[in-house]
Image (cartoon, rainbow, N blue to C red):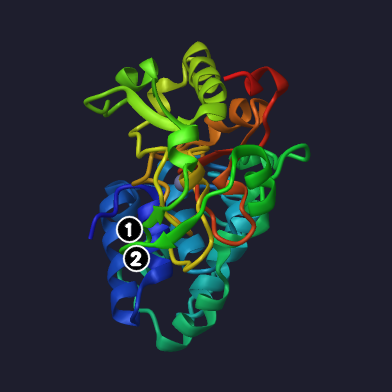
């Protein structure tokens, strides 16, 4: 199992299917990432200390349901001490919240044995969906009030009607002239400057989305943000929304594009700003230029996804 980032660890703990698996993850992470000086008792962790060791302990406590994302201070503070105390009490070890963290407490992590009971109680606490995680501390871009993800009628009014039948999988066959009349090929030069540039910088999109897409990528380049983009995963794709039978995807209209797909899985909490593949810094410019971000979907997060949700008058001439 790959456990390199906080995200990997928290997801692995959250998704662990058995107490055995959970125990192994906690043991592996604490042995691998907590410094040997602390594990061997050569030094303790003192109150208010901010170290990598504290961070790892907090990540484990979060994954085990003893801390919420908003409590990830990176510092051995009161909240963390109380979480450690609670965690230790399950093993009948009493922790004095006013004393440093010693090797004995760290041993609880390196020799951790989860119980099925703990698994079932903590699984309900899906702390990763904690609304507090969206707070400023994690640089969650505020949800826009001036744009929303357009519904079908709104999309049809702005971009044209698609007559279609289901093809294989999520794909559709467009039966009217929508594609011919609206979908164009443009050059998006910034694609050659992203981490994994595609072979071609040509993309297919709706004629009314061309200017906004070009403007947004230019803006990202101006802001020095192209390095944040790992990959490009397409714009116009004639398909329904994944997992649905009959809801046309904004990709079918050629008004949405996906980036950083591997780090921003559908239905997952998009990575925080210092985590691999985070798109959060890209969002403010997108919102300003009329692109709704999939991380702002209420139900199923889609952090890879940006969709045009407004057509400015100057873009109507295409
Ligand atoms: Zn998408």
User: Residue at point 49% right, 42% down?
Assistant: 178
Q: Report x, y in % for residue 102.
A: 43, 58
Q: Which element is circle 1 on?
A: helix
Q: Are marks 2 and 1 in contact (CB under 8 Å)?
A: yes
Question: Quarter of the image containing the C terminus?
Answer: top right
Toward the viewer: 149 or 118?
149
- Is the distance from the Cβ of mark 2 to the nearest ligand 1 atom less than 8 Å? no
Q: Which mark is residue 229?
A: none
Q: Quadrant of residue 190?
A: top left
In the rendered image, the quadrant that contains the N terminus is bottom left
Question: Mark 2 — residue?
Answer: 26
- The image position of residue 129, as x and y in percent, is 58, 61
Local packing at callout 2 (Cα closer than 10 Å; few below 14, some 14-19, many 20+) is many
Q: Position of residue 207 (x, y in %)?
A: 52, 27
Up/down of 245 relative to 121, above or below: above
Tell whether 93 sits left or right of 188.
right
Q: Nearer the viewer, residue 27 or 248?
A: 248
Residue 142: x, y in percent? 70, 39
Could one spot residue 264 in this view of the protein? yes
Instruction: Out of 185 and 127, give the one closest to the viewer.
Output: 185
Farthest right residue? 145
Q: Which quarter of the picture shows residue 216? A: top right
> How far is the residue under mark 2 from the one under mark 1?
6 Å
Please give the name of the residue rendered at 59% of the width and 29% of the height, measured from the top-left corner.
286
Residue extending farthest top: 222
**Camera-nearest residue between 195 and 251:** 251
Mark drawn on residue 30: 1
For the point 47% across and 15% down, the residue is 221
Could you classify mark 1 by the number of other residues whose Cα lies within 10 Å: few (under 14), some (14-19), or many (20 or more)? many
User: From what the image shows, is residue 105 above or below residue 16?
Assistant: above
């Amino acid at each position: 199992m790959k456990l390199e980032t906080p995200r990997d660890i928290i997801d692995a703990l959250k998704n662990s299917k058995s107490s055995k698996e959970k125990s192994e993850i906690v043991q592996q992470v604490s042995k691998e990432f907590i410094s040997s000086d602390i594990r061997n008792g050569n030094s303790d962790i003192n109150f208010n200390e901010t170290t990598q060791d504290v961070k790892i302990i907090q990540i484990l406590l979060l994954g085990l349901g003893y801390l919420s994302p908003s409590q990830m201070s990176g510092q051995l503070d009161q909240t963390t001490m109380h979480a450690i105390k609670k965690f230790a009490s399950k093993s009948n070890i009493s922790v004095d919240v006013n004393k440093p963290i010693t090797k004995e407490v760290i041993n609880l992590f390196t020799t951790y044995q989860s119980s099925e009971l703990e698994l079932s109680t903590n699984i309900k606490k899906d702390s990763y969906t904690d609304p507090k995680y969206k707070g400023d501390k994690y640089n969650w871009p505020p949800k826009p009030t001036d744009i929303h993800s357009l519904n079908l009628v709104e999309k049809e009014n702005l971009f044209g009607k698609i007559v279609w039948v289901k093809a294989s999988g999520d794909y559709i066959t467009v039966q009217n002239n929508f594609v011919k009349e609206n979908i164009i090929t443009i050059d998006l030069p910034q694609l050659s400057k992203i981490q994994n540039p595609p072979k071609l910088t040509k993309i297919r999109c709706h004629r009314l989305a061309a200017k906004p897409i070009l403007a947004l990528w230019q803006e990202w380049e101006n802001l020095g943000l192209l390095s944040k983009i790992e990959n490009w995963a397409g714009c116009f794709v004639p398909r329904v929304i994944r997992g649905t039978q009959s809801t046309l995807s904004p990709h079918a209209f050629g008004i949405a594009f996906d980036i950083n797909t591997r780090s921003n899985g559908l239905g997952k909490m998009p990575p925080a700003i210092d985590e691999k593949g985070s798109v959060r810094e890209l969002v403010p410019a997108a919102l300003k230029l009329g692109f709704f971000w999939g991380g702002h979907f209420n139900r199923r997060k889609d952090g890879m996804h940006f969709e045009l949700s407004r057509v400015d008058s100057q873009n109507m001439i295409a």
